[in-house]
Image (cartoon, grey):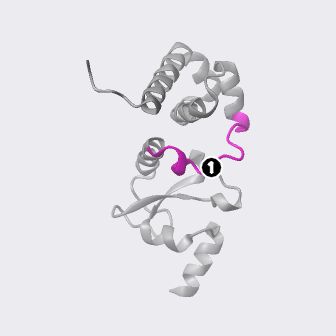
């Protein structure tokens, strides 16, 4: 008998398997409605929704994805699913070519920053996430990009 898998881990791996299988089955429909450039974001979003709401059917998942109405009022993503946050971070870093969006520094200690801060209504959508060096992210805190750049000019 193999190692005992904790129930939550088993559930998460089964739900991800289900999402992968359903998206493979309906890939043409999803690509035609979501678009190739947003397919990866939709795939990861489905993992997150599956953990909270279960599978709703492909048509309903696509509909809710465009409305983004299943995310309202939830706890911050990085507090609920570290594995998913790590996957999203890798995607954001790669998309932004490992360059800080604020100071232009390449590499080093990078973090994912919310362009519109979470505390001011921002969300975890890929369009609202960007690569930031640790220094810029810690200095930005919950400022908007405009506020942060003005603050930075003043404090340099």
Q: Residues within 10 Å of mark 1 (few under 14, many from 20)?
A: few
**32 is higher (above) or lower (below) than 118:** above
Residue closest to the far top: 25
The range drawn in magenta is 66-82
| Camera-side residue of 78 and 128 | 78
Q: Is residue 117 magenta-colored?
A: no
Q: Is residue 73 magenta-colored?
A: yes
Q: How many marks?
A: 1
**106 is higher (above) or lower (below) than 75:** below
> Mark 1 highlights which residue?
75
Does residue 102 appear in this view?
yes
**Residue 117 sits in which quadrant?**
bottom right
Give left or right: position of 50 versus 11. Answer: right
* Residue 104 in the image, given as x and y percentages of width and height: 43, 66
* Residue 123 in the image, given as x and y percentages of width and height: 64, 50
Residue drawn at 46 percent across, 46 percent down? 82
* Residue 112 in the image, given as x and y percentages of width and height: 48, 56
Give left or right: position of 96 versus 122. Answer: left
Give left or right: position of 138 versus 1. Answer: right
| Camera-side residue of 15 and 60 | 15
């Amino acid at each position: 008998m193999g190692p005992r898998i904790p129930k939550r881990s088993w559930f998460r791996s089964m739900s991800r398997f289900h999402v992968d299988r359903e998206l493979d089955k309906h890939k043409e429909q999803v690509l035609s409605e979501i678009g190739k450039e947003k397919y990866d974001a939709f795939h990861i979003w489905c993992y997150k929704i599956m953990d909270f709401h279960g599978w709703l059917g492909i048509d309903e998942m696509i509909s809710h994805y465009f409305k983004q109405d299943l995310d309202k009022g939830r706890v911050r993503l990085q507090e609920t699913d570290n594995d998913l946050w790590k996957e999203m971070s890798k995607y954001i870093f790669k998309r932004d070519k490992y360059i800080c969006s604020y100071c232009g520094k390449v590499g080093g200690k990078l973090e994912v920053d919310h362009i519109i801060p979470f505390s001011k209504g921002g969300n975890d959508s890929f369009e609202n996430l960007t690569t930031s060096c640790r220094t810029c992210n810690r200095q930005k805190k919950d400022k908007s990009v405009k506020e942060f750049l003005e603050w930075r000019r003043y404090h340099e």
